[in-house]
Amino acid sequence: MTDLIDRLKDKSLLRTDSYVNAAWIAGEDRFAVTNPADRSVLAEVADVGEAGARKAVDAADQAFQSWKKTSVYERARLIQKWNDLILEHADDLGTLITAEMGKPFGEAKGEVIYGAGFVAWSAEEAKRLHGETLQTPFPGSRGWTLRQPVGVVGCITPWNFPAAMITRKCAPALAAGCTMVVKPAPETPLTALALAELADRAGIPKGVFNVICGDAQKIGPVLTGSDVVRMIGFTGSTQVGKLLMKQAADTVKRVSLELGGNAPFIVMDDADIEKAAEGVIASKFRAAGQTCVSANRIIAQGAIADQLVEAIASRMGKLKVGSGFDKGVQIGPLIHEEAVARVDKLVQDAKKRGAKILTGGSPLVDELGGAFYAPTLIDGGNDYALELACFEIFGPVASVYRADDEAEILRLANDTPYGLAAYLYTSDVNRVHRMSEGLDFGMIGVNAPMVGSPATPFGGVKESGIGREGGKWGVEEFTEMKFVLLGGVD
Ligand code: SIN
C-alpha cells in the first residue's frame, strides 16, 4: 500500500470506498486487492453489497430524470472534461493498472490513452445523435424517429482492461443521456474508483456515474433484477454473459455483451512472414495474452509453417518477463495464480497429446514470486483437438497449427462457438475479400494485429456476444428508437 501511494503523483486518486450519488460510501466488509507480481496487498476496498447496489440504482434513477434532459452540448462538455482529466492523470492511472492488474507500465498507460479515445469520441458523437423523417402511407401525415437514452445502465467490467472497458461503455452511455452503475472486477477496483474521482472532478452531476465494488453474487442480481435498470453492459466470459442474459430476461432488459473469443490468426502462403510474426507477438502477448481478441490459434498454410514458427521463436526469445514496473519488461504476471494453473493445464494437455513445446511450457511462480507464466511456443501440428485450440487460452502461450488449402483453413477457423476477432495475413486481395467474408467473426484484422479503436465497431457474433462498442454504433447501443406519427397536417 505504501509503495503504491509513493508511486502516485496525485495521491488522492487512491480511493477505496465506492462512489454513489457523488459521495464515497463504505459497506460492512472490505476485501483485499493484491499485486499479482508479488502478492502484496495494495488496498482494502469496501464491499458495499446489496444495500450499496440498491442505493446506487436509486441514485442513477433519480439522476436520469435530469441528465436525459441536459443539453447534448452540456453533456459533451462534461464528458470532454472527464477525458482531459483522464489524460492529465494518465501516469497515475497507468500506475494503478500495473499495480492491480500487472501489465507493464508503458502498456498500462497506453490503455489509459486508448480508453480516453472512447471518451473524446463519445463527447463529439453526443452532438451527432439524431432521428430521421419518414414517409408514411397516410396523406397529410408526418413521421419521424427519435433516439432517446435507454435509461439506467448497469455495467459489469473485467480486470484485463481496468480503464478502457469502463470508458468504452460509460462514455457513450453518458453521451446518449443514460446514467450508470458500474461494478468493476474485484481484482481491479482501484482504477475504476480513480476514474470515478476524475468524473467527480469533471463535474459530472451527482448520481449520473456511480461505481460500486464488492461481491458479484450480491451486486449482480440487484442490477439484473431491478426494473429501473434498463440495460446491462458486460465484458467478460461467455459463461457469465449467458447467466446475465438469463437474469436480464425477467425484466426484458437490453444486453450488450462482449464475451470470450478463440481468435484464429491465419497466415497464408503468400503473406509477409516477418510481418505476420510481428503481428503474432503484438496480438498474443498484449496483456500477457489476457485479451478476448488475442491470437488463440495460429494457423499457417502449408510450407510456410516452419518459417513462421522460427520467426515467432526468434522474437519470443527477446521477451522480458517480470514486474510491470521494471524497465524493459514486456510480459507481466497473469491476474492470479489460479490463472497460471488454468493456463498450465492447457499446456500439459498439449504435452500429453504429443505437441512440441518449443519454448517455455511452465509456470514461473517460484522463480519470480508472482503469478508468472513463461512465454510459451507450441507446435500443435495438425491437432486441432488440443484444449489449447478449443478454449480461450488467456495466457502467454502461442500455439501454431498447420493446414493446406483455403477452404480447409476457413472451415477450421470457423469451427468454434466463438466469433469475436480473427486475423488474416495475405498479400492477395482476392483472398482478403473471400476470406474476410467467409470468416464468422465480428472483427477481422487483415495484415493487422489489433482491431479496436474509438471510431470502429468492436464486438462479436455467435457466443462471443451481442452489440457493438465504439464509433457511432457504440453510442446508438445506449438509445431506444422511438417512432412518432403526426396525423392530419394539411
Ligand atoms: C478485450 O480483450 O476485451 C478488449 C481488447 C481491445 O479493446 O482491444
Image: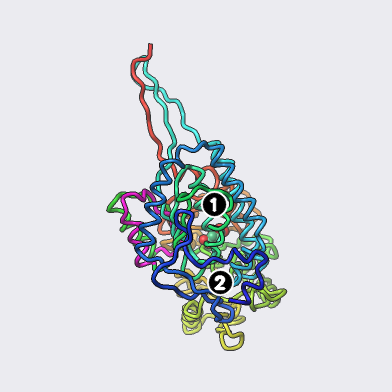
In the picture as drawn, the residue positioned furthest to the top comes out as 490
* 80 or 233, nearer to the observer: 80
Can residue 259 be seen here? The reply is no
Above or below, comparing residue 46 to residue 134 in the picture: below
Q: Which mark is residue 436?
A: 1
**How far separated are the C-alphas under marks 2 and 1?**
37 Å
Residue 39 appears in the picture as rendered: yes
Q: Quadrant of the N terminus?
A: bottom right
Which of 356 and 49 lies nearest the eye of the viewer? 49
How many residues crowd around disc 2 within 10 Å: few (fewer than 14), some, or many (20 or more)? many
The first of marks 2 and 1 along the sequence is 2
- Going by the image, does 31 lie left or right of 309? left
Find residue 385 and report its image quarter. Answer: bottom left
Q: Which residue is mark 2?
A: 100
Amino acid type of the residue tagged 1 in the rendering: Ser
Disc 2 element: helix
- Of the pair 233 and 451, the residue shown nearer to us: 233
**Near-viewer residue (420 or 480):** 480
**Residue furthest toward the left?**
250
Q: Is mark 1 within 8 Å of ligand 1?
A: no
- Helix, strand or loop at label 1? It is helix
Q: Alpha-carbon neighbours of circle 1 within 10 Å: few (<14), some, or many (≥20)?
A: some
Magenta segment boundaries in residue numbering: 216-238
Task: Kindly check if marks 2 and 1 are in contact, taking CB atoms under 8 A apart as contact.
Answer: no
Magenta highlight on residue 229: yes
